[in-house]
Structure formats: structure tokens, C-alpha cells
Image (tube, rainbow, N blue to C red):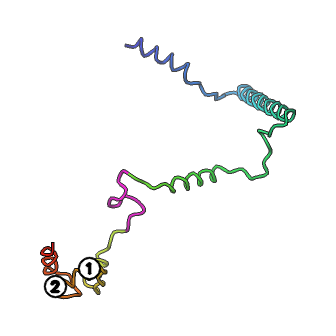
Amino acid sequence: MSRFVGAGKKLMSFLVPKPNVPQTEIQKKIRDLKISTQKAKAGTAKLDQTIFELKNNKPFTFAKSKKKSESNTEKYKSMLDKATEKKADGGRIGRRFGGDTMPKRKTNVQKIKDTFGPKKNLSAKQMKIAKLAGNPNKIDGADFKKLRGRR
């Protein structure tokens, strides 16, 4: 079994590059030299591309922009704005305490005020039901009996 574990480690060492973390001053200088040579190669490639486009009358790939580039926080904020634009679906959304869009839970005082406070007016549809039998300002059992009998 340990033979296979060793083979797996060997395979992973080829796939995953080791990070370059220098310990001494010389190693740090070598790292900085490698980075600067890579930047120089990139700069010359950009220059060659621009010269080619200039000779062939094509639009520039690496044209200078006078716009302010986005900072990381601005990119993050714009990404958040795009994410919140989408309507959420699935999961526990719409359930009790499922998200920020849910209404706050009523307090006991609010419940008492709703129960014993002034009654709300009936809607047009409710008024039609209430007029069937009995009190036209209140829906009661007689109204529902009358409704069932109409079918």
C-alpha cells in the first residue's frame, strides 16, 4: 500500500508547482531578477505587436486608455451589484427567516393592536360575499352557506 502512496506523491510533485519562497538575500535577488526578465519579455512582445499593427494599419491591441482603471474594491462592488440583480430561487428563500427580504416578525404588542384595534374595510370581492346574507359589513357563516347553495 505504501508503494502506491509514494507513487502518488511523486505524480503530484510534477503536477503542482512548488512556490518560490526565498530564505536568503541571494535567493531573493535571483527571484527579483527572474520577475524582471519576465516583465521585459512581456514588454518586448507588446512592442512587437504594436509595431506590427502600425505597419499593417490595424487597430492597436494595447491602446492607451485615459480612463481610470477599476480598483479591486470597485470590481468587488460591481460584482456584488450584478449578483444582487439576479432573483434568488431555491433553497430556503421565502421561508420563515429565510433572507433579508422577509418581513420582520410581529411583536406581541403589534399582535394585540391588530386583534383589538379598529377593523379594516372589506375589499370589493369581500363586500359581494358579505351582501349575500346577513350583515353587509361582515363576512360570516351564513354568507358561506349561501355561496355553497348557489353552485
Quarter holding the N terminus is top left
Disc ID at residue 146:
none
Residue drawn at point x = 38 percent, y = 67 percent: 103
- From this view, report whether residue 66 is shown above or below residue 13: below
The segment highlighted magenta reads 90-103
In the image, residue 9 above or below residue 50: above
The quarter holding residue 134 reads bottom left
Q: Residue 76 at x, y = what percent?
A: 59, 51
- Which of 52 and 15 lies nearest the eye of the viewer? 52
Judging depth in this view, the residue of 113 and 133 nearest the camera is 133
Residue reaching furthest right?
55
Distance (Cα) linking label 1 and label 2: 12 Å
Residue at x 55% of width, y 56% of height = 81
To which quarter of the image does residue 126 belong? bottom left
Q: Nearer the viewer, residue 73 or 25?
A: 73
- Identified by mark 2, the residue type is Ala
Mark found first going from the N terminus, 1 or 2: 1
State the residue at coordinates (61%, 28%): 19
Which amino acid type is shown beneath numbered disc 1? Answer: Gln
Q: Position of residue 77 (x, y in %)?
A: 59, 54
Identity of the residue furthest to the front in this view: 151
Q: Secondary structure at mark 2?
A: loop
99 within the magenta span? yes
Give the labeled residue for mark 2.
Answer: 133
- Secondary structure that dominates the magenta span: loop
The quadrant in which residue 148 appears is bottom left
